[in-house]
Amino acid sequence: MTGTTDPSRTAAPVPTGPKAGRVLSRLAGWFDSKIGLPFDRLRFRISLRHRSGPRKIDLPREAVTVVALVRDGAYYLDVFLAHYRALGVSHFVFCDTGSTDGTLAQLAQEPDVTVLQSRLPWGRFENIFRGYAARKFSADRWCLFADMDEILEFEGQAQLGLSGLLRYLNQHEYSAMMAQMLEMFPQAPLRSVAQQSYPEVQRSFCHYDISAVCALDYHDPATGLGFFLSQNQIPDAPPPKMQFGGIRGAVFGERCCLSKHPLVFIGADIDPAVHPHLSTGVRVADTMALLKHYKFANDPMARDQASLAAVSIPHGEDALRVAGFTKKPDLTLWSQTAQKYDGPETGPAALREAGFLQVSARYLAEIAD
């Protein structure tokens, strides 16, 4: 594990029928919430350690805290911290699951960072860890859940900034903003850029391909996420889509989920991070953000081999990628259907026009004023 959460672990197989899908999804969710979670939460609290940074933070209500799961994430830290600080984040809480590189030492030097640690198996306890951190450090404020290899951008970012975006969400009484994950990749074979630094990756991984994305209605039982999604309210115009697959589906056969609730207001009636991609009890906004996802940075072949050996998550997606790289060592994600991402000024708008992001006319009108 590199400090990133593989979204493919959340993608359930498509049920054989709508009714069967709803029943199985909700039964599994009920059993986990009533029996499994209380015991796991007790184990987690016993295991939890405070490693560095403030134990409590006193921030205004408009401040935003990032909560990020990390393990051996030193490769990503400089870019990650710089991006979210520039966006307007006030504090970071890193949920460390057992780093052995320079992650902990580096984060201990950052005044706006708190590090918590639990060495329990992260694949089982990541939701509990994130949820705990969000409630403790973002109660009655907005929390931004971000993985180490994710860069958040949104339409109107230059005009609004994060503070302006939150004013819009608060004004219209939303409590969560969705985002779609965009897999970023270079034009070169992945093996040839495996040792690039993360700043170099930000420059060279400038392409994406959405030609194979599968979009489902938010409440479609075929998502396999009905237990969670049924507890949320969504806007009528435009109705948000849950998206799967994309370039990873086309090349490796993954059914990875590309949709998330990264920005969530941690209110009393909201259950944050009950799933690696989702919170419940939220009112979803009528505009979406973009999460540029750098899954294929930092020697992905070696990371997937290590993940497969450790059996961190039983989803099988790392095995699919290892098989793909083994079969074709010079594998590239670039093809004639790839497009270049031109940055936050025009990139999110282009993806909205392509149907990848759903953004309301009201939001566009307000950011234009």
Image (tube, rainbow, N blue to C red):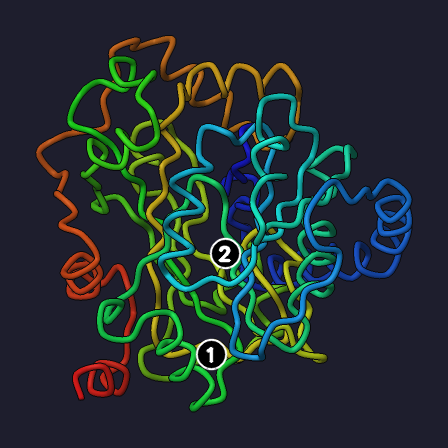
Quarter of the image that includes the N terminus: top right
Quarter of the image that includes the C terminus: bottom left
Horizontal side of 191 relative to 320 (left or right) equals left
- Amino acid type for the residue under numbered disc 1: Ile
Local secondary structure at mark 1: loop
Label 2: how many Cα within 10 Å (few below 14, some 14–19, many 20+): many
Q: 109 or 297, which is in the foreground?
A: 109
Q: Quadrant of residue 171?
A: bottom left
The tag on residue 6 is none
Say if 230 sits above or below 292 in the image.
Answer: below
Q: 140 or 186, which is in the foreground?
A: 140
Please give the name of the residue rendered at 41% of the width and 50% of the height, measured from the top-left corner: 258
Instruction: State the separation of the CA atoms marked 1 and 2.
Output: 16 Å
Horizontal side of 110 relative to 255 (left or right) equals right
Q: 199 or 272, which is in the foreground?
A: 199
Residue bearing mark 1: 234
Residue 73, position as x, y percentages in the image: 53, 31
Residue 219, position as x, y percentages in the image: 50, 69
Residue bearing mark 2: 223
Q: Disc count in the image?
A: 2
Residue 49, position as x, y percentages in the image: 81, 42
Say if 1 sits above or below 366 in the image.
Answer: above
Label 1: how many Cα within 10 Å (few below 14, some 14–19, many 20+): many
Please give the name of the residue rendered at 82% of the width and 44% of the height, measured from the top-left corner: 48
Q: Quadrant of residue 335?
A: top left
Residue 123, position as x, y percentages in the image: 68, 37
- Amino acid type for the residue under numbered disc 2: Thr
Local secondary structure at mark 2: helix
Say if 178 sits above or below 173 in the image.
Answer: above
